Image (cartoon, rainbow, N blue to C red):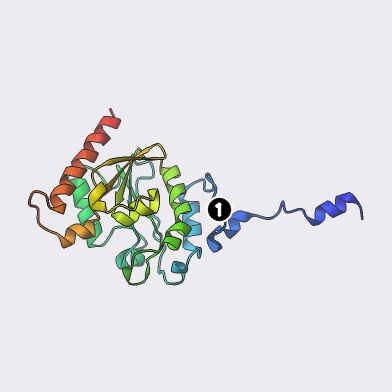
Amino acid sequence: MSSETQLSLFDDSNFNAKELIPTDAKVDIPRGTYPNMDKLAEHCRSCHRCELGKTRTHAVIGRGNLQAKIMLIGEAPGQTEDETGLPFVGKSGQLLDKILASVNFDTDKDVYIANINKCRPPDNRVPTNEEMLACKPYLLEQIRLVDPKIILLTGATSVKGLIGDKRPISKIRGQWLEWEGRLCMAIFHPSYLLRNPSREKGTPKWLMWQDIQAVKAKFDQLNK
């Protein structure tokens, strides 16, 4: 047997690791894997990197402007999102849109919205660490593709899932945090605001108003 034949037996040039991405959480998703969001969505819709793929109706990729300066990241899809395949379209989403509109942010122009996890956990439970880690490479590619100047993290799970900070949201909300050279701010999840409707000074809704104004001010400053 010639040396060339022996080498050909171990030639893996036809092996495409990218094909394994949606099936094995151990397979890395290198930076630059996806040329656009449509290609990323194809993998998400067929993904079984964690058990959530078995129970989803739709993978929830994102909505909004793919060139937005602000990216908002939620926790995981709920029932309405699972049914429609779009993030933040239930009652929480309706409130979120009102909050953004209150400072003249247009969700079709100024913001791109995604989630830590693309699939709904059963009974809307919090995603496990393993589930978040399995899905995180998709999110990192989304951030690369959108390339936002500001990232808003809604709720403690979103903060933990992206930047690894485990502090309660009440301790870090409203503060500018730097992650990978980007400005991030943790804010209350809209569902929490729905459970706490008071607008009195010091309440979650009042604090959210302060936070979203700070975001608007920073946005305007960065776009001068």
- Viewer-proximal residue, 57 or 133? 133
Residue located at (76% from left, 53% from top): 11
Indicate the secondary structure of the residue bearing disc 1.
Answer: loop
Q: State whether residue 72 is above or below residue 128.
A: above
Q: Residue 214 occupies which quadrant of the picture?
A: top left
Q: State whether residue 191 is above or below residue 142.
A: below
Asked if residue 114 can be seen in this view, the reply is: no
Q: What amino acid type should be assigned to the residue bearing mark 1?
A: Asp
Left or right: where 59 falls relative to 23: left
- Viewer-proximal residue, 112 or 29? 29
Q: State whether residue 155 is above or below residue 209.
A: below
Q: Residue furthest top?
A: 224
Asked if residue 162 can be seen in this view, the reply is: yes
Left or right: where 37 falls relative to 106: right
Q: Please state, as top left, top right, bottom left or bottom right, where the N terminus lies in the image.
A: bottom right
Residue 76: x and y in percent read 35, 60
Residue 52: x and y in percent read 44, 68
Other residues around mark 1 within 10 Å, as few (<14) / some (14–19) / many (≥20): some
Q: Residue 60 occupies which quadrant of the picture?
A: bottom left
Residue 164: x and y in percent read 39, 50
Residue corresponding to mark 1: 28
Residue located at (48% from left, 59% from top): 134
Residue 183: x and y in percent read 33, 39
Q: Residue furthest right?
A: 1
Report how many numbered discs are placed on residues in the image: 1
Q: Please state, as top left, top right, bottom left or bottom right, where the C terminus lies in the image.
A: top left
Q: Residue 129 occupies which quadrant of the picture?
A: bottom left
- Viewer-proximal residue, 4 or 167? 167
